[in-house]
Amino acid sequence: MVINKKGTKQKLTTMKNLKKRLLIIAIIITTTGFIGMPNILMAQTYKLITGKDVSIKVLGSSNIHGWTEVSTVMESQGEFKFDDEQLKGLTAFSFTVNAKSLKSEHESMDNRTYTAMKADQYPRITYKLSSATITTVQKNKYLIKATGELTIAGVSQSITLDVTAVVNADNTITCAGSKKIKLTDYKIDPPSFMLGAMKVTNDLTIQFNLTYKK
């Protein structure tokens, strides 16, 4: 019987190298959570909470007085990313409000506004995110610069929103902000009332206060 000492030594060396590699892999898995890669931030879906504290407002003015239309009937959701309880990303976001759910204190004005917005033909006002950057302001408070497409009366325009996002104690996220737009950018003629005696100006301000939960 011939004993191949060289072959045995090679096998022992191979086994030692294999054990070292397995040990390295085990360390990587323990410290990163994935073989050879750092922790991957997973986006979580948050949906809009409906209620009296959640609203979108459209503020305008005329040659006589200012006016406000409000809606609390909306649909919206976003994909928020967290790392170590810090908000790090917003990868998707959509918002929809029915044009005719916007109400002021004057029904006749609302009806003229719906006509100007072509609400029968284009019943929904929508916003869809294309990109976002997030800056930490203080603990649990962030500034989100969100660029996306706002569509009104069938016309889409790219706009950037400055959104203040607060992560609440119950892990909900409240997003608030405002944006000035011009009606003519959406091919809407500013409506007039009382045989032209009251004329709505071209500038509007959209204000929003929205809260989301997983």
Image (tube, rainbow, N blue to C red):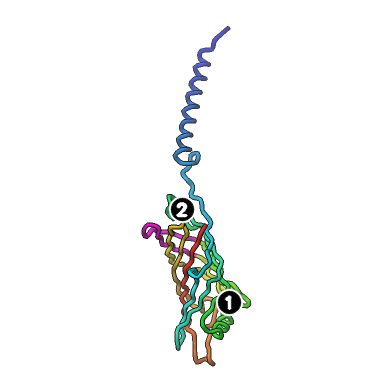
The residue indicated by pointer 2 is 82
Residue found farthest to the top: 1
Q: Which residues are magenta?
A: 131-147
The residue indicated by pointer 1 is 100
| First reached walking from the N terminus: tag 2 or tag 1 | 2
Residue 8: x %, y % from top left: 52, 16
Question: Element type at marker 2?
Answer: strand
Residue 84: x %, y % from top left: 43, 50
Which quadrant: the N terminus?
Answer: top right
Considering only vertical position in the picture, is 208 above or below 6?
below
Query: Magenta segment: does it hold 50?
Result: no
In the displayed structure image, the side of residue 50 where residue 164 appears, left or right: left
Identify the disc placed on residue 126. Answer: none
Residue type at mark 1: give it. Lys
Query: Magenta segment: does it hold 133?
Result: yes
Considering only vertical position in the picture, is 172 above or below 190?
above
